[in-house]
Image (cartoon, rainbow, N blue to C red):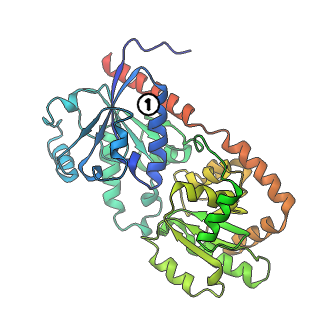
Amino acid sequence: MGSAMTHTLAVGVDAGPMVGRGGISRYVGPLVRALVASASALDIRFIVRRGWQQAPGVEELELLAPVTRLSMPDRALTGWWDCTGQSLPFPPRLWGSFDCYLSTSLMSPVLSRGEVLSIIYDLIPLRLPALFPDHAMFREQIRRVCERSSALIAISDRTKQDLIDLMDIEPDRIHVVYPGRIQNMQKPRPDQVAATTARYAIKRPYALYVGSMGPHKNVATLLRAYEQARRTNRLSASLVLAGGTEWGGETLALLESLTFRRDVVVTGFVQDEELAALYAGADVFVFPSLYEGFGLPVLEAMAYGKAVIVSNGGALPEAAGSAGISVDPKNVDAFAQTMAHVLAEPGRRESMEQASLVQAAKFSWGASAAALAGLMERVAGRGRS
């Protein structure tokens, strides 16, 4: 048992991602809310940068902790810290008022006192540089974050190892804080599932993918595998792609060329209530990414007791554990065959569903928040010694 804190720690949190809707927000939001709920020895203040101040939900943050809104644009903030290497003198005393500061979006400040802890989600642009023309800028951004941080928080062992291998970071500076499964999860009622599938004209049974259509998400391979499985009469299910399409131009063009286009539903971004219904109604969940720092949708699907098929890219086998089936992300045949087999074999699917529930139960936001609070205590203690 570690010793109790002898005084309250003043903690600043870059809280903008708590009100976003992307993958980062689905990690930061539940983690920080669990931290606020459970860590009574932390005096937490949220920092909301200018670019986040019009986002829906900012006002609700004040119900959790005091909020400081910054008027300076992000470019000016980073320019000051990058060019001077010094803490900002304004707002007065803010940047010297924390024992710990949690950087949640690769924008780590220079503090006049206190320690910075920075979350690193993945190093995908460095693992797949051909897909990310600005990978050199990303490397420099990561380098600055690592330089300014007393400790780094990786969301998986894979991301920790990538920091060691690609950025030459000392292992003892990196601490893994996993995501948790969905909090207070209530399984949607059958009528709610039916209403959501009807709204999007989804025919059941269906395979589900949740995420963006960015280049590393590899949705084109999933579409080719689906088309192949349908052509060979091994698969009769629909395919549902749920998530933003902002980076999906080439993938959507491929979709329009498919023979079975009418059986592929692209929902666009969906709110959490409808997303829950899509998870609950799915017969199998498929996640074909080339590389992931963790793969939170896989954990979400398992929390709903879904059989999962994932690529073996990055941390996805780590997330799915022995519950899922891992496939080479470039192997169209393997995806096609695995989807067809899982959907055609109820006994196998039921076994995978039970294994998914067991795997998902290993992840808890409460445990993650406790690990983070303990890390803050240790890092702040080193700074005071």
Question: Which of the image's four quarters has the C terminus?
Answer: top left
77 and 344: which one is in front? 344
Seen as rendered, the residue at the extreme right is: 347
**Residue 276's quadrant in the figure?**
bottom right
What residue is rendered at 46% in x and 70% in y? Answer: 245
Q: In the image, what residue type sits under mark 1?
A: Val
Q: Position of residue 325 (x, y in %)?
A: 72, 58
Position of residue 318 relative to residue 343, above or below, is above
Q: What residue is at 59 percent from the left and 37 percent from the top? A: 364
Q: Residues within 10 Å of mark 1 (few under 14, many from 20)?
A: some
| 379 or 55: nearer the viewer | 55
Left/right of residue 274 with respect to residue 143 in the rendered view: right
Q: Does residue 314 appear in the picture of this structure?
A: no
- Say which quarter of the image contains residue 104: top left
Q: In which quarter of the image is the N terminus?
A: top right
- Report if residue 188 is visible in the image: yes
Tell me if 73 is positioned left or right of 316 in this view. left
Badge count: 1
Q: Name the residue under label 1.
A: 36
Residue at image position (56%, 75%) is 220
x, y percentage for residue 333? 71, 75
Q: Is residue 370 left or right of residue 83?
A: right
User: Residue 269: where, in percent of width, then height?
Assistant: 48, 64
Give the x, y percent position of residue 285. 67, 61
Give whichever of 248, 333 is nearer the camera: 248
Name the element at disc 1.
helix
Q: Is residue 107 above or below residue 377?
A: below
